[in-house]
Image (cartoon, rainbow, N blue to C red):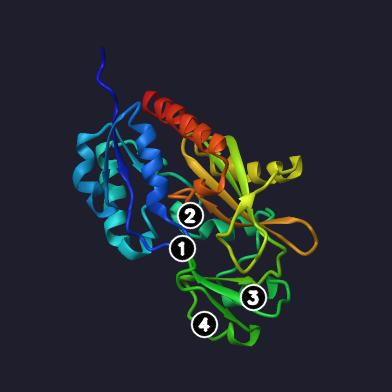
Amino acid sequence: MSPRPRLLYVSDLAYPARGRRYCDEDIHLTARLRESFDLALCHPLDAAALMDGFDAVVVRNSGPVIGYQKEYEAFREQARARGTRVYNPLHGRGDMAGKQYLLDLTAAGYPVIPTVDRPEDLHLLPEAPSYAVKPKAGADSIGLRFLPYEELDALGYGEILVQPRVDFRYEVSFYFVDDLFQYALHAPDPERRWVLEPYEPTADDLAFARRFIEWNTLDHGIQRVDACRAPGGELLLVELEDLNPYLSLDRVPEETRERFAVVLTDSLRRFLEA
């Protein structure tokens, strides 16, 4: 009998997420994954030093890498140099690579909140009462500011993005494993982003989300497509999270939570065999 695959599961169990408990989610998932894999859990700062002893590294709730950018880049470089399997794979085009994708998708005409990163492009943004200014390498609303239009010219451009502040009706997130849709959750109150409820997507909603999954070209991994329902009723992309998307499994029925663990296990098996 061949030995069971060995997984290094990366999570910052103590990360102080607002309105969320990362550790609960990872405790649940690691308990289920241990049924099929030999598994060890480590902090993201320890992953590079430990990964050689494992068949794959599973990056989960590792927190915003802006807090340890140098170490994260070193981990990526070492994983590539050693041929280490990392789940999600490191060629993701979404948040894994920063916020450049918001500019690329805007330029390509995708349904995304319009985004620019140069003062000479500010005229391309629709008129709004205020504008969101965020760092390209940001996450979890770190560094987010809202400014009036007349203050935008004075910003130091290069590492920031500017978007109109959308008066959306609600936010909704679509969760995928590989290219398989799993469930959707929405925040009925725009002021309470992480107070989520199950959401039954329409065919148009799923077609919207799948456009970004297909654009990202990840054959394996967990992705979350975050969108907002604009005043006109259309969905606009807010974020394509392909690095370490929080899954809000505590907000779904037990049946959905258990099914997700099974799907994740099957995905990891296929990933290791690829």
Q: Is residue 227 left or right of residue 44?
A: right
Look at label 1 and name its amino acid. Ala
Image marks 2 and 1: residues in contact by CB distance under 8 Å:
yes
**SS class of the residue under badge 2?**
helix
Q: Name the residue under label 2.
A: 95
Q: Name the residue under label 3.
A: 122
Q: Which of marks 3 and 2 is nearer the N terminus?
A: 2
Q: Residues within 10 Å of mark 4 (few under 14, many from 20)?
A: few
Q: Could you give the CA–CA distance between mark 2 and mark 1, rounded to whole angstroms?
A: 8 Å
Answer with the quarter of the image where residue 192 lies: bottom right
Which one is in front in this view, the residue at disc 3 or the one at disc 1?
1
Which one is in front in this view, the residue at disc 4 or the one at disc 2?
2
Task: Find residue 20 and report its horizontal and vertical position in percent.
Answer: 46, 58
Look at label 4 and name its amino acid. Leu
Image marks 3 and 2: residues in contact by CB distance under 8 Å:
no
Q: Which residue lies furthest to the right in this view?
A: 232
Look at label 2 and name its amino acid. Asp
Which one is in front in this view, the residue at disc 2 or the one at disc 1?
1
Q: How crowded is mark 1: few (under 14 residues within 10 Å), some or many (20 or more)?
A: many
Q: Which residue lies furthest to the front in this view?
A: 254
For residue 155, the mark is 4
Q: Could you give the CA–CA distance between mark 4 and mark 2, rounded to whole angstroms?
A: 23 Å
Q: Is residue 32 left or right of residue 218?
A: left
Which one is in front in this view, the residue at disc 3 or the one at disc 2?
2
> Viewer-proximal residue, 248 or 112?
248
Q: In this view, does 100 lie above or below 11?
A: below
Image marks 4 and 2: residues in contact by CB distance under 8 Å:
no
**SS class of the residue under badge 1?**
loop
Residue at left offset 70%, top offset 41%: 207
Q: How crowded is mark 3: few (under 14 residues within 10 Å), some or many (20 or more)?
A: some
Q: Mark 1 points at which residue?
A: 139
